[in-house]
Amino acid sequence: MTSSNLKVKTAWLYYVEGLTQEQIAEKLQVSRVKVMRTLAACTSEGIVVTTINGVTAEQIALERELEKRWNLSSAIVIPTPSSEEHLETAIGHAVASYLGESMQDGMTLAIGGGATLYASLRFIEKRQLKDASVVALVGSLPHSRWVNPSIVAARVAEAYGVDSYQITAPVVVDNASLRDALWQQESLKDVKQRAEAADIALLTVGGITPESTIFRHDILSASLIGPLTAKGAVANILCYVIDAEGRLIDHEVNRQIMAIDLPTVARIPNVVLAAGGTAKTEAIRAALKVVAAKVLITDSDTAAALLAKY
């Protein structure tokens, strides 16, 4: 279990939820001695006085509610920035911190693209992992700007000094027959098998609006927004378009996407969803249903909105 602040989460579990030190050690996957020392530090550092201090405690409360509501192993809630233009950077920083704690030797990370994950690249601490790898979950764009999904996988692999495996085909192909034929290529079969065996999947999610990355940067034509919305579309994840229940929309575009299919991604043991902004509330809910994420990284305003109807 990870958090925006593990010391405060330890204090919260002990003083507010009444868990024993042994239960906390099991939940956080640390030793009981570590729990004891953390609780002692919380007292000496003034984190715990009579109550748990202010703003961070509100974040922990949101984390715990999200964990319970969505059956998450961890929720990481960061303060919502004062300006929305800094939101992707703030969540990207939290994503980089999570990867720094979670990626270990021998692990495979399967990763999508998008503005939030791209924003994490500047914060990832370079280190050398052994026998690890990074697998792209989405195809490529012919024009290699930052929005190209394959860039994220390549840059993360470079930071960890490991190999990356790419879906060497366009994100969107001309028709379903071509997509099916491409997946029969031995090189792409290998990429899919590596994704299936991944330890962590890192994704983001967007809405079905002109401001969404896939429409704003013409990965999908903005002319599709009306027809997709009419069919109930609320979100895009790995460029697939889904409804509020996490079901693929019955539209030709979903049969043209070169990305690892969502049921395969959902079977990866640790699916991490990183997304924020209250405008994405419905999209995030839909994504949580389709990929059964174990970790959610978001901001406090969005966390409150996700819980508002429940």
Image (tube, grey):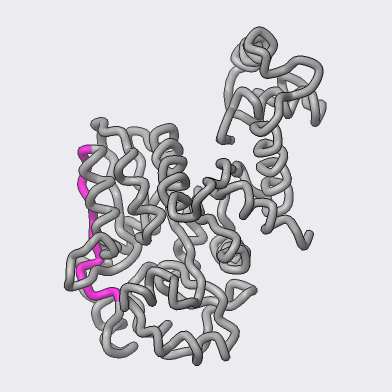
Does residue 130 sit above or below 156 in this rendering?
above
The answer to whether 203 is drawn above or below residue 254 in the figure is above
* Residue nearest the observer in this picture, 22 or 114: 114
Residue 32 visible in the current orientation: no
Q: Position of residue 140 (x, y in %)?
A: 24, 68
Who's the residue at 47% across and 89% down the image? 251
Question: For residue 170: magenta?
Answer: yes
Rendered position, 52 above or below 72 = above
Which residue occupies the extreme front position in the image?
Answer: 83
Magenta-colored span: 161-171
Q: Which residue: 56% across, 54% down? A: 293
Asked whether the viewer can see residue 118, the reply is yes
Q: Is residue 264 magenta?
A: no
Which of the two residues, 230 or 262, is positioned nearer the viewer here? 230
Instruction: Specify the quadrant that holds the N terminus.
Output: top right
Return the x and y of residue 95 as percentages of the image width and height: 44, 44
Residue 188 drawn at (x, y percent): 24, 68
70 horizontally vs 98: left or right: right
Q: Is residue 208 left or right of residue 135?
A: right
Q: Please give the name of the residue rendered at 39% of the width and 40% of the height, measured from the top-left corner.
A: 96
Instruction: Give the left or right position of residue 220, taking residue 154 as reference.
Output: right
> In which image quadrant can residue 147 be found?
bottom left
Q: Quadrant of the C terminus?
A: bottom right
Quadrant of the image occupied by residue 264: bottom left
